[in-house]
Image: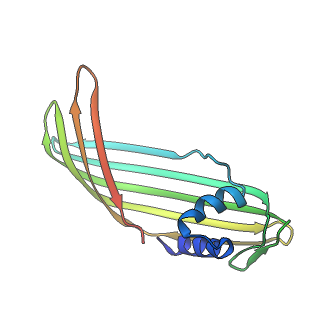
Amino acid sequence: MNDIQSKIISVIAEHKAIEPTKVAHDVLLDELGFDDSATLLRVDSMFRIGLRHRVEFGYTALDRSSYVVLGRDFEFGDTQVSAGEAATVRYRTQAFRAVYGYSFLRDEQKELGVLLGLQWPSFDASLGNPESQQSESASAETPVPTFGAFASVALRGNFSARARIETAQVE
């Protein structure tokens, strides 16, 4: 978890007096007026380099914003919004990914390999009070290593089964 996530969760948890794992859903969706659903943009590409090598690039983005009348006092940094006042809220996360893959096993029917690369996640959050024209924002961005594995097997006809696992540690 990075500094901005810790800051957001600690501020929200202090107001809610609940465990941090429930904070994101309860506050972001309910109190701050975000919709229950959102559209996630994801773009992935993969390029083969010879029989056993591949390079992958990816981009993921989620941008949520709302205009809400708060049911309780809320403070984010130096910006305060009192209960009953309107607030503009925005939370954006995006990640770029570059990965190298090596196939230990690859033929016409099956493939098995490992992945190694970097992700560049960024997190941005802002809270504004339109009445006082105050606003506060915070952001964080840092490259992190990513590791993974992939497998695929050809089934009957043009069908195949694929599996992939990838992990990145964000602190």
Inspect this view and state whether residue 118 appears: yes
Percent x, y of residue 117: 30, 59
Q: How is the image coloured?
A: rainbow
Residue at 39% x, 60% y is 119
79 sits to left or right of 97 = right
Where residue 112 sits, quadrant-wise, is top left
Inspect this view and state whether residue 32 appears: no
Where residue 47 sits, quadrant-wise, is top left
Q: Quadrant of the C terminus?
A: bottom left
Percent x, y of residue 89: 71, 62
Percent x, y of residue 91: 62, 60
Q: Is residue 92 above or below residue 52?
A: below
Q: Is residue 1 above or below residue 24?
A: below
19 sits to left or right of 79 = left
Residue at 37% x, 66% y is 169
Instruction: Give 168 or 120, whichever is nearer the viewer.
Output: 168
Numbered marks: total: 0
Residue at 50% x, 64% y is 122
Query: Among all residues in the image, which is located at the extreme front?
Result: 18
Residue at 18% x, 39% y is 111
Instruction: Give 74 or 150, whichever is nearer the viewer.
Output: 74
Percent x, y of residue 152: 23, 37
166 sits to left or right of 139 = left
